[in-house]
Image: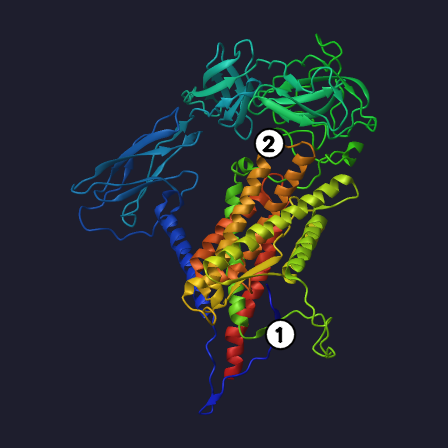
C-alpha cells in the first residue's frame, strides 16, 4: 500500500536573463487556509474577551471620568437608607441626573458593580432610580453609588450603615442516613425545619453545615425542608428569613433479603468459576457468600444481579450459598436463606483468602449458620469492601464480564480469556462524557494528523520517488531465467499467509499462553482477521470492479503488516486493554480492464479508460464505510452475547471482539491521507467528505478504545500527535520558505 521512498536532490529552476526562477511550492493553499483560521480564532477570542470585559458589570472597571454632557445641570446622586435586611436580594434606590448612568459599587471590590442603571431623560432636576442587588451576609455594611456619566463634576454618594443576614441554603434530594447539608454565614446557628421537630446545628469556619435528622421525628418519607439562621456577629438581624423549601427524601427501611436463583438448591458444581445470580432491590449492592465467606459482589440493575467467584476457588464438599444486600441509602438488609450445593471439582483446591476480601462475618440473629449482615459502610462507599478485582459488576453489564479465572479449571476449552473483557458496551459509551472525549479526539485527529500530513506530503511531493520493496540491493547478481527464477507465488496463497501473519501479530498483542483456551482464542482471532479483510477489502473491491467495469486487484501489503507489528509492540509495552491492533493487511485497487471484460462498453478491442480520482475515491469510500459497518456490527454482537458461556459462546465473543478492535484500528489508519491509503484517495476526490468520515470514524474508534475501564493513554497519544504535527509543519516551512530564500540568494 505504501511505496518505498527514494530521496532525490532538488534541482533549481533554469535561469532566465541571469536570474533564478523559483517554482511556487504546492501546499501553500493549505497553509494559508490554516493561517486564516488561526488568525480568525485569535481575533474572535480577543473580541470576545473585550466584549465580556465591556459588557459584564461584575468585571468592568470604573470608566475614565467624563467631562459632562449637554442638557440639565448634573446633580450628585443619592441613595436611600437600605436598612437591616433578613434576605440577600435587596432593592436599593435614590435620585440622579436625568439621562445619566449610575452604578452601585460592590463594597468588597469597588471596581466591580452590583448593578447599573441608566436614568430616564426629559427632566430638568433629579429623577429617581432603583435596582436589585445581591448582598453578602455581614454587619455594618455601606453601599456607594457613582454617576459614571458625570463623575468629573459630581461626587459619589454613600448609604448609611446596615446589616444583612439572609437565609442559608439546603441541599435537596436523597438524605443518606437522614443527613442534610448546606451553606450558611460563618459560625451561624442554623435551624432546619420541615419534620415533626426542628434540628439546630452550627456552621463551620467555611460556612458549611450538616445535620443528621433523628429517626424518631424524621422517619422514612419525603419532606419539604427549610432553614433559617441567626448569628451573634450580626446582632441587628435577630434571625434570617426562611429559605425556599426543597424536597428531601429519607429512606430508613432495610431492604428485603435478596433471592438467589443460581446456583440451585442441591446442584452439583463441577466447573469453576461459579456464577451467582438472583434478584434484589434496584441500586442495591449484593454480596454473595459461600460458607459465610464473601466471594463476589454485584449491583442490582433492572431487578437482577450476577457475579462470579473468579477470585477464589471453592473447595470440594457440601457448601452453603447465601446473599445479602445494602440499598442505595446504605440500609443493610438480612441475609437470604441458605442454599446447599455440592462442589465436586476434583482439580479445585482451597484458595487462601484474597487480601482484598472482606473478613468472614459471624452469624447474625435469626440467621443460624449464615452470614451476618455486612458492616455498614460509609455513605461514600455503599458497597463495602470488594472481595476481588473481578468479582463485582456494574449496572449495564449485568454484573459480569469476560474475566480470566484463576482456578485450575481455566485449562478447559470452555474457559474464558481476558481478550476483549474491557470492551465497553454501546450503552456504557452513551453515559457520562465518553462521547464528548471521543469527539475531542476526532477533532485532534483532523488538526494534528490530517492537516500536518497533507502539508508534509505537499512539501515532499516530487522528492520521494516510489520504489518497490526489494530484499537485496541494486547490485544483486543477474541470473538467466529458469523455471525456478521465473516462478511466482499464487496471490491467494500470499493473501492467506499475510492474513495468518496478521492474526499472529494480533495474538501477540492479546497475550497468548500455553493453555488450551488460548488455542481457541487464536482460532477466534484468525477468523476475525480473515472476516475483516474479506468484508472490508476483498468484497468491496470485487463489487466495485464489476459495477465500474474495471479489473479488481487485491494484494498483500508488507507495510501494513509492519504497522500492525508496531501497534502490537505499543500494546505490549504500555499494557493497553482493549489492545491497539490492526487487522487489514490486504490492499484493494481498480485498474483498466480489457474491453472483453467490459461488455457494456460497446467496444470489442482495446482497454477501458484509466481509473480516475473519482473512481479511486469511490472505492476508498466504500472500503472505509465497510470498515465502519463491520466494526459496528461486531461491537453490537459482542454486547448482545452473554458474558460467560461454553466453547461456542467464548469463541463468538473473542471473534466479535477481534473484528471490532482490528476493524476500528485499521479504520483510523485508513483515514490518514498519505501514500496509497484510502484516506489519500478520498482526500483527492473530496476533502469535506474526508473530514466528515474522519470525524465519524475516529469518534467511533475513540469511544470504544477509551470507554469503560480502558487503559488507553489519551494524553500520551495527543502529545505524540502534536509532536509529529510539529515536525510535519517544520518540514513544510523549510521547503516552502527557507529553501526558497536560499535558492534566491
Look at 66% across and 17% down and name the residue there: 324
Q: Residues within 10 Å of mark 2 (few under 14, many from 20)?
A: some
Label 2 or label 1, whichever comes before in sequence order: 1
Look at mark 2 in the image and give the residue it sits on.
397
Counting the numbered discs, the total is 2
Image quarter (top left, top right, bottom left or bottom right) of the N terminus: bottom right
Query: SS for tag 2?
Result: loop
Q: Residues within 10 Å of mark 1 (few under 14, many from 20)?
A: few
Q: Which residue is mark 1?
A: 6
In depth, the one of 534 and 240 nearer the eye is 534
The quadrant holding residue 269 is top right
Residue in view at x 65 percent, y 35 percent: 649
Vertical relation: 101 (above or below) 200: below
Name the one closer to the observer, 633 or 226. 633
Q: Secondary structure at mark 1?
A: strand
Q: Residue 498 in the image: x percent, y percent?
A: 67, 57
> Marks 2 and 1, Cα distance to the nearest angstrom?
52 Å
Residue appearing at x 69%, y 17% in the figure: 264
Indicate the position of residue 198 as horizontal and vertical percent values. Answer: 49, 13
Amino acid at each position: 500500500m505504501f511505496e518505498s521512498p527514494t530521496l532525490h536532490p532538488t534541482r533549481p529552476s533554469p535561469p532566465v536573463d541571469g536570474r533564478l526562477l523559483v517554482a511556487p511550492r504546492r501546499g501553500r493553499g493549505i497553509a494559508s487556509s490554516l493561517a486564516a483560521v488561526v488568525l480568525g480564532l485569535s481575533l474572535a477570542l480577543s473580541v470576545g474577551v473585550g466584549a465580556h470585559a465591556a459588557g459584564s458589570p461584575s468585571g468592568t472597571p470604573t470608566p475614565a471620568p467624563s467631562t459632562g454632557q449637554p442638557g440639565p445641570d448634573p446633580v450628585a446622586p443619592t441613595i436611600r437608607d437600605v436598612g437591616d435586611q433578613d434576605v440577600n436580594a435587596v432593592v436599593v434606590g435614590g435620585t440622579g441626573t436625568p439621562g445619566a448612568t449610575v452604578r452601585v459599587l460592590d463594597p468588597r471590590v469597588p471596581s466591580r458593580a452590583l448593578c447599573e442603571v441608566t436614568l430616564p431623560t426629559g427632566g430638568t432636576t433629579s429623577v429617581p432610580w432603583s435596582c436589585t442587588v445581591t448582598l453578602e451576609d455581614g454587619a455594618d455594611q455601606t453601599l456607594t453609588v457613582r454617576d459614571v456619566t458625570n463623575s468629573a463634576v459630581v461626587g459619589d454618594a454613600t448609604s448609611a450603615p446596615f446589616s444583612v443576614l439572609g437565609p442559608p441554603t439546603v441541599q435537596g434530594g436523597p438524605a443518606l442516613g437522614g443527613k442534610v447539608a448546606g451553606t450558611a454565614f460563618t459560625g451561624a446557628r442554623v435551624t432546619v425545619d420541615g419534620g415533626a421537630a426542628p434540628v439546630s446545628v452550627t456552621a463551620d469556619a467555611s460556612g458549611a453545615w450538616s445535620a443528621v435528622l433523628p429517626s424518631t421525628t424524621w422517619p422514612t418519607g419525603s419532606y419539604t425542608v427549610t432553614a433559617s439562621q441567626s448569628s451573634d456577629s450580626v446582632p441587628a438581624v435577630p434571625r434570617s428569613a426562611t429559605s425556599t423549601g426543597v424536597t428531601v427524601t429519607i429512606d430508613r427501611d432495610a431492604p428485603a433479603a435478596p433471592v438467589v436463583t443460581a446456583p440451585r438448591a442441591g446442584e452439583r458444581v463441577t466447573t469453576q468459576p461459579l456464577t451467582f445470580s438472583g434478584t434484589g432491590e434496584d441500586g442495591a449492592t449484593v454480596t454473595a457468600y459461600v460458607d459465610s465467606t464473601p466471594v463476589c459482589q454485584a449491583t442490582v440493575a433492572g431487578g437482577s444481579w450476577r457475579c462470579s467467584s473468579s477470585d477464589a476457588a471453592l473447595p470440594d464438599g457440601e457448601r452453603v450459598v447465601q446473599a445479602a444486600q445494602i440499598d442505595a441509602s446504605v440500609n443493610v438488609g438480612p441475609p437470604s436463606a441458605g442454599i446447599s450445593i455440592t462442589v465436586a471439582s476434583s482439580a479445585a483446591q482451597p484458595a487462601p483468602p484474597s487480601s482484598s476480601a472482606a473478613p468472614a462475618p459471624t452469624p447474625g440473629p435469626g440467621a443460624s449458620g449464615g452470614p451476618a449482615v455486612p458492616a455498614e459502610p460509609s455513605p461514600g462507599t455503599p458497597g463495602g469492601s470488594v472481595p476481588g478485582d473481578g468479582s463485582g459488576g456494574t449496572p449495564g453489564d449485568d454484573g459480569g464480564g469476560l474475566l480470566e479465572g484463576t482456578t485450575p479449571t481455566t485449562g478447559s476449552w470452555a474457559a474464558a480469556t481476558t481478550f476483549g473483557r474491557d470492551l465497553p458496551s454501546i450503552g456504557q459509551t452513551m453515559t457520562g462524557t465518553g462521547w464528548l472525549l471521543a469527539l475531542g479526539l476526532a477533532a485532534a485527529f483532523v488538526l494534528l494528523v490530517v492537516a500536518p500530513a497533507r502539508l508534509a506530503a505537499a512539501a515532499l511531493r516530487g522528492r520521494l520517488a516510489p520504489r518497490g520493496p526489494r530484499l537485496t540491493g541494486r547490485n544483486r547478481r543477474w541470473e538467466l531465467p529458469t523455471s525456478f527464477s521465473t516462478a511466482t507465488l499464487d496471490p491467494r496463497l500470499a493473501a492467506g499467509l499475510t492474513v495468518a501473519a496478521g492474526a499472529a501479530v494480533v495474538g501477540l498483542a492479546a497475550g497468548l499462553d500455553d493453555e488450551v483456551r488460548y488455542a481457541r482464542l487464536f482460532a477466534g482471532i484468525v477468523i476475525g482477521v480473515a472476516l475483516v479483510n474479506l468484508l472490508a477489502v476483498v468484497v468491496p473491491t470485487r463489487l466495485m470492479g464489476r459495477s465500474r467495469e474495471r479489473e479488481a486487484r487485491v494484494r498483500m501489503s508488507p507495510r501494513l503488516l509492519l504497522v500492525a507489528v508496531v501497534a502490537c509492540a505499543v500494546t505490549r509495552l504500555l499494557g493497553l486493554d482493549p489492545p491497539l491492533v490492526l487487522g487489514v493487511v490486504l490492499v484493494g485497487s481498480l485498474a483498466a480492464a480489457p474491453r472483453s471484460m467490459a461488455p457494456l462498453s460497446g467496444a470489442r478491442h482495446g482497454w477501458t479508460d484509466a481509473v480516475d480520482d473519482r473512481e479511486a475515491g469511490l472505492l476508498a469510500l466504500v472500503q472505509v464505510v465497510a470498515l465502519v459497518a463491520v466494526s459496528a456490527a461486531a461491537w453490537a454482537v459482542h454486547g448482545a452475547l452473554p458474558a460467560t458461556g461454553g466453547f461456542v459462546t467464548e469463541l463468538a465473543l473473542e471473534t466479535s471482539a477481534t473484528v471490532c478492535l482490528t476493524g476500528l484500528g485499521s479504520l483510523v489508519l485508513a483515514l490518514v491521507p498519505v501514500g496509497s491509503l484510502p484516506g489519500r484517495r478520498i482526500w483527492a476526490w473530496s476533502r469535506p467528505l474526508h473530514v466528515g468520515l474522519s470525524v465519524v470514524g475516529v469518534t467511533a474508534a475513540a469511544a470504544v478504545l477509551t470507554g469503560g475501564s480502558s487503559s488507553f493513554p489519551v494524553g500520551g497519544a495527543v502529545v505524540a500527535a502534536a509532536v509529529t504535527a510539529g515536525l510535519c509543519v517544520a518540514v513544510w516551512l523549510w521547503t516552502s520558505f527557507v529553501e526558497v530564500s536560499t535558492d534566491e540568494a
